[in-house]
Image (cartoon, rainbow, N blue to C red):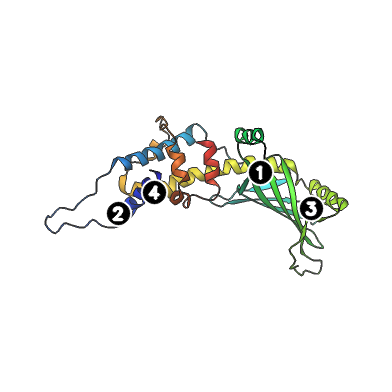
Amino acid sequence: MARALVRRALSLAAAASSPAKASPSFSTAVVPLRSPMDEHLLRLLRSEISYISDHRPPYPPPKTFKSFGVEDRPGEQWVRLRAAGGGAEEVKIDATMFDGAAVPPPDAPLFQRVESLERGPRLHLSLIVEVTRADRVLGFICSAWPDELVVRHVLTLREANGSSTGNGGRDFMKLGAKERESVRKFLQEREVDDELAEFLHEYIANKEKMELLRWLKTECLAGISMTLDLFHPWELKSNRPRASGSGVKELLYCAPFAQLVPVGIVIFTHQIV
């Protein structure tokens, strides 16, 4: 059903962009009629936009976190944080949208799998931390979980003589215990810690909701309204009741539609539907 809805929507947008051809036997043009499937698709999209806008609206993203300035990038799948350290040092962090989730192993006990389903997915995002100093540029590749920041690789991006290094860095877990503790302390002194991971998860969850609304109102809405002309700005804030069932969720999870949705949106949609 969901696949048919998407194919119908795309065919409507294509039909709107090409002029109608006149029938060879009659002087009037043949205008395609809207089917109940088209109306159902419109109801789903309009209801989804109204529900997110009115009941679970995104909040204005914060512009700072501790000593970091947060650079939001609307339409992009990442966010950047910058902080000026002591002296000529600068810390830059690039964080992705949600790019994975932890799941129990196949041989996990049943109660553990049930608890995991009740809690929902433990989402993951990746960080690239660059610390620019007078003598070199250090890099750290990290994993951010909802309550924990884990260092995965440590690398030197630029040496004191200005030359770039071509090695892939060192696996954090293969370092000695004292070296690992030194790296953790180095990052914690620059506020790259568990609190940052928690902040980024809240920030990215809100950003994904904003990106979903932006995509529904511009990319998705514009293509369909070319033909049906049913979506108006004043309708997006109406008190229209939410469509029953999980049609929107099914639509967002079908393969053709998922290719059009920005990366990460599908995961978060499951939580807000």
The residue at the point 63 percent across, 39 percent down is: 202
* Residue position for label 3: 173
Mark before the other along the chain sequence, 3 or 2: 2
Label 3 to label 4, Cα distance in Å? Answer: 49 Å
* Residue position for label 2: 15
* Residue 62 visible somewhere in the drawing: no
- Name the amino acid, label 1: Pro
* Residue position for label 4: 222
Label 3 to label 2, Cα distance in Å? Answer: 57 Å
Q: Nearer the viewer, mark 2 or mark 1?
A: 1
* Residue position for label 1: 105
Q: Is residue 109 above or below residue 253?
A: above
The residue at the point 61 percent across, 40 percent down is: 121
Mark before the other along the chain sequence, 3 or 1: 1
Mark before the other along the chain sequence, 3 or 4: 3
Q: Nearer the viewer, mark 3 or mark 2?
A: 3
